[in-house]
Amino acid sequence: MKFTPSPILPEVIIIEPDVFPDERGYFMETYHQEKFSGGGIDMRFVQDNQSLSERGTLRGLHYQIKRPQGKLVRVLYGEVFDVSVDIRRSSPHFGKWFGITLSGDNKKAVYIPPNFAHGFCVLTDTAEFFYKCTDFYQPDYERAIRWDDQDLAIDWPIRDPILSERDAACSFLRDAELPA
């Protein structure tokens, strides 16, 4: 496995697994605690989640104000543009974002630390998205930042996304309730 800090947000880590193809298909290790620890991700994961979304769906930018979640994200099939945003007010990277294409073909994963907002948009007819979390989902603490916040200026590869009611009505970063 190869672990590479992202060029914009060094705490966000790109993981490239070793893939072993043969005439039957392929094998790859998607998580190995000792290798992840050696790659700078020494976290305990407590919850797994999976979603299926259609082309043009945008989910995010989500985070929790208490009991923040680190996330290890990957795409099982299809393709998404995945975005992490540093929402730590004390960080020199506050308000900066990093985006990467994740797909069932490239098999890359990304680790997003706690106190970062996260979202993705679907670029193929469908995409199945899988992620591990370092803390449990707490609906009372969940918050979101608008996907089209001009202060963030995220260069999403879609223009008119399919949004949930909640994601369509969330706050801009300047007005958002952020983690302590």
Image: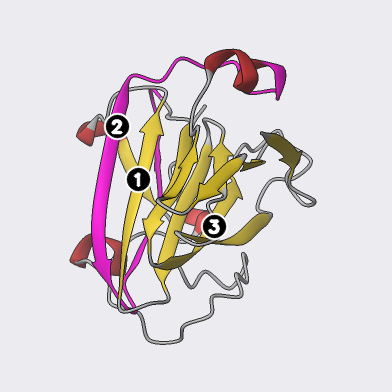
Whole-angstrom CA distance, mark 2 to mark 1, is 7 Å
* Lower sequence index among marks 2 and 3: 2
In the picture of the structure, the residue carrying the numbered disc 2 is 48
Q: Position of residue 51 (x, y in %)?
A: 25, 53
**Residue 26, horizontal then vertical, whole percent:** 47, 47
Which mark is drawn over residue 83?
A: 3
Colouring method of the image: secondary structure
Give the residue type that dot 1 points to.
Phe
Q: Give the range drawn in magenta.
A: 38-67
Q: Which element type, helix, strand or loop, lies under badge 3?
A: strand
**Residue at x 46%, y 83% (from the top left corner):** 158
Q: Circle 1 sits on which residue? A: 130
Which is more toward the observer, 50 or 114?
50
Q: In which quarter of the image is the N terminus?
A: top right
Q: How crowded is mark 2: few (under 14 residues within 10 Å), some or many (20 or more)?
A: some
State whether residue 51 is above or below residue 140.
below
